[in-house]
Amino acid sequence: MIVGVIGGGQLARMMALAGLPLGMEFAFLDPEPDACAGATGELMVGAYDDPSMLDALARKVDVITFDFENVPESSVRALAARVPSLSSARALGVSQDRLREKTLFREIGVPTAEFAPVDTIADLESAVADIGLPAVLKTRRLGYDGKGQVVLRSVDELASGWEAISGAPAILEAFVPFRREVSVIAVRGRDGETAFYPLSENTHRDGILRLAASRPGDPATDAARKLAARLLEELEYVGVLVLELFDTDSGLVANEFAPRVHNSGHWTIEGAQTSQFENHLRAVSGLPLGDTSPIGPAVMLNIVGEAPDTEAVLAVRGAHLHLYGKEPRPGRKIGHVTVRSTEGAGLEIAVQELLALSGVG
Ligand code: AMP
């Protein structure tokens, strides 16, 4: 089986690392000639929306999936007509647009922050009058890792906030006073079977995920799974899908979803019976889903901007290092470390040891 992946970043690379032992081969489409998944399969260098490249990919592979969701929905629909296993065009389209995403949440009864579309500064003023402050102004499209969004705290900040997002089509969301951020990693097979991992509890800094801890037995688990299940069914989704939630005093509030494997699920490589990457591949290729149960608690720490000393990471008991083969750059995710509790070694202590290393967390 040859799996085509649109996007050749670390998610594609980790998918291939999970799929190679299952006898799968990989082809990646990415505009960057040094895309890091290239080490694990054939890299086709070209634009994500280049019809001739998408056509070449479709001819080569049995299954197509994504590590990157900002591919035009129209290109994906055209591909879906040719590669029967590709069923996520709608999920991809909805997740690309925060207005469609929040509207879908509302339609299917998934609680989300109050929101309003904003296309002009006048819209922004009336949205603020309705929703109140503080609020978060976000571009509808192409926002990630905290980019394309600004928190508005007073009416004096409306003009500068509008300028900060360059007047792009946007939404205004009420600011959610959350206690913590969690995500639920869910998978749905072609036959409609679903499975869920333990919740991840996620810590961000400067808009970038730094740490994700698995929380087997977390009290919010059932509620989070119910919401994710609603989304999977509505979208008739196949593969791994991750729903990011705010945990508040009045329950869970959905922030966004990603129709793909996700950074908050990297701990599943060592911390679950079957990783999110393997389960995504199993789902999209019509294979039985793997066991999602945890192998004890695990914590994943991102490596951002600079690589830590390999020896120092590996000296921490229970630590597993994943480097993506990417050039370090400020703010760039270039790897992660997962630490699992081991006999005699405290997980908290190991996490503190890792956090003391430059580049980690
Ligand atoms: P996003 O790009 O929507 O994932 O947002 C990035 C981060 O900004 C989230 O992980 C939260 O920490 C914060 N954030 C986003 N939206 C809101 C909101 N409506 N209220 C409070 N914090 C938010």
Image: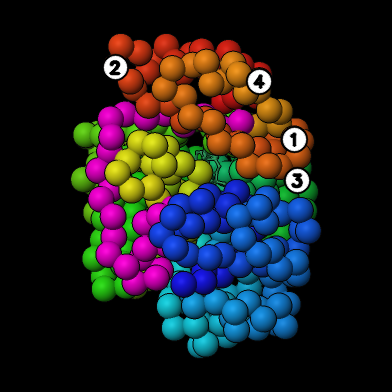
Distance of mark 3 from mark 1, alpha carbons? 27 Å
Structural distance between the alpha carbons of marks 1 and 2: 34 Å
Q: Residue at x 30, y 11 (%)?
A: 344
Is 236 or 9 nearer to us in this picture?
9
Q: Are marks 4 and 3 in contact (CB under 8 Å)?
A: no
Choose mark 4 or mark 3, whichever is in front.
4
Name the residue beneath numbered marker 3: 164
How many numbered discs?
4
- Magenta segment: does it hold 132? no
Mark drawn on residue 343: 2
Helix, strand or loop for disc 1? loop
* Residue labelled with disc 1: 328
**Tag 2: residue type?**
Glu
| Depth check, front residue: 242 or 118 | 242
Magenta segment, which residues? 277-303
Q: Please determine whether, in this image, residue 359 is positioned above or below residue 264.
A: above
Q: Tell me, yes or no, whether the two marked residues, 4 and 1, touch with CB atoms within 8 Å.
A: no
Q: Which mark is residue 309?
A: 4
Q: Secondary structure at mark 4?
A: loop
Q: Are marks 2 and 3 in contact (CB under 8 Å)?
A: no
* Residue type indicated by callout 3: Ala
Residue type pointed to by label 4: Asp
Pair 2/3: label in front:
2
Q: Residues within 10 Å of mark 4 (few under 14, many from 20)?
A: few
Q: Earlier in the sequence, mark 2 or mark 4?
A: 4
Q: Where does residue 191 sit, x and y in percent of width and height?
A: 26, 73
The residue closer to the viewer here, 85 or 71, is 85
Please tell me which of labels 1 and 2 falls first in the chain.
1
Compared with 214, 106 (above or below) is below
| Quarter location, residue 348 | top left
Give me the C-alpha separation between circle 4 and circle 3. 37 Å
For label 4, being within 8 Å of ligand 1 is answered: no
